[in-house]
Image (cartoon, grey):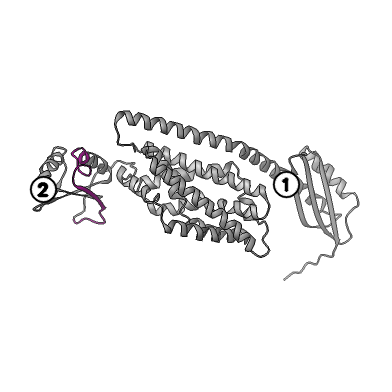
Amino acid sequence: MKTIQVVTPTEESDKVAKVLSDSGRDFSVISGKENTLILITSVEEDVEEILQDLKRTGVGKEFGRILLSPVAASLPSIITKKPLISFQRSSNDEIIQMVEKSTKINVNYFILIILAGVLASIGLLGNNAAVIIGSMVIAPLLGPVTGTAMGTILSRRKMFTDSVKMEAAGIIIAVVVGLVLTYLYPGASTTSEILSRAQPNLADMALAIASGFAAGVALSGGLESTLVGVAVAASLLPPAANIGVGIALAQYSIASGSLQLLLINIFSINLCCTAIFWLQGIRPTVSIRKERVAARVLRRRIVAVLIALMVLAIPIGLTTQTLIRQANYTNVVNSAVYFQALPPNSAIIGNIGTLYDTTNNILWVNVLFFAPSGVPPNIARTLSLVISLGTGIPTVTVVASVNATVSTIFW
């Protein structure tokens, strides 16, 4: 439920009241000497239609003001018939103002970006997933990304350019923070959290698309509280900080992979939010000629984003294919190594390392055995032969063994 408060000059109140009466709306009027307050209580589904009726009379444009506020409770309760399946949706003006708030450049934005960059960098370098998640929660990068989508839909150049500037500034700050903290961090080196954001795959793209749709639904439904979860799923700031970490470590493949992941997230969220806003009926309130121009601009931007995503999808698809092959080869290697460790060798496996060299199409395997009487001298050759037969590619195997006696303790 929403309460619509219309503050209008008293001489214009009769015109507004007539429009509401003709449309069958229930309302209350509190008249004053100069201004009149009209109160309308309505279900969410009718708010947009009421606002359009009010705007057509000139309220909010030529005279007066419209205020919206949610109804926490009503005594007696207002019972309305609802369809079996219904979707909660805010009015266009509420959605626009909600997005507009996050596109205003202010000091708080930069402070939060710096703090989130510090948390993300420390989490990446310290291999701490909890700290990285904390950086996602406080990072305000999702707002400008949704702002570019709204600016595109409404054909508002200032909103679009301001959002792009905020995105760019936030990303640059996060990269610089990651770069500086890596130089200051004692014993900085690559960790699994750093590497996981340097090899984007199709699953990351699917997650970004789902996050984009979730952000659009949350904003259009007035569900601001869920945007924290969307921000965590979208993961915009950690890849940005990871670019700086990769540059500082002179691991430029990490920096480029993180940049790919960041661009995928930004473009996917932008595209999906744009689609949701369009499907929700958000349009620029301009003349027919300007509306056609806005539609052309919208089409051009959507095509540009789609092309960018397709270009990014090519290396990501290749990376995904490589990861799948690596996983399949690892399974073959593990099976072969564990089979060789069985009696009569009676060895215990200390470590198995598998690396697929995509450039030379060679599989490199490193195995460490702990065995009481050592391992056969030809075990490396045997493993290479078995693994090559299982994978279909040449394999180089390096075996190290440590003479050790294994004791079993029963409690």
Q: Is residue 67 magenta?
A: yes
In-image side of 70 versus 108 (left or right): left
Q: Position of residue 292 (x, y in %)?
A: 35, 29
Residue situated furthest left in the rendering? 33
Q: Position of residue 218 (x, y in %)?
A: 39, 47
Mark 1 or mark 2, which is nearer the start of the sequence? Answer: 2
Residue type, label 2:
Thr
Q: In this rendering, which labeled residue sits more in front, label 2 or label 1? A: 2
Q: Position of residue 48 (x, y in %)?
A: 27, 41
Residue situated furthest bottom in the rendering? 411
Badge 2 marks a residue whose secondary structure is: helix
In-image side of 380 versus 6 (left or right): right
Tag 2 residue: 10
Residue 100 sits above or below residue 133 on the image: above
Residue 313, by quadrant, is top right
Would you say the residues marked 2 and 1 are in contact, meaning their CB atoms lie under 8 Å apart?
no
The dot on residue 330 is 1
Quarter of the C terminus within the rendering: bottom right
Q: Residue at x 48, y 32 (%)?
A: 303
Residue 298 sits above or below residue 189 on the image: above
Q: Residues within 10 Å of mark 1 (few under 14, many from 20)?
A: many
Q: Is residue 317 magenta?
A: no
Residue toward you, 128 or 76: 128
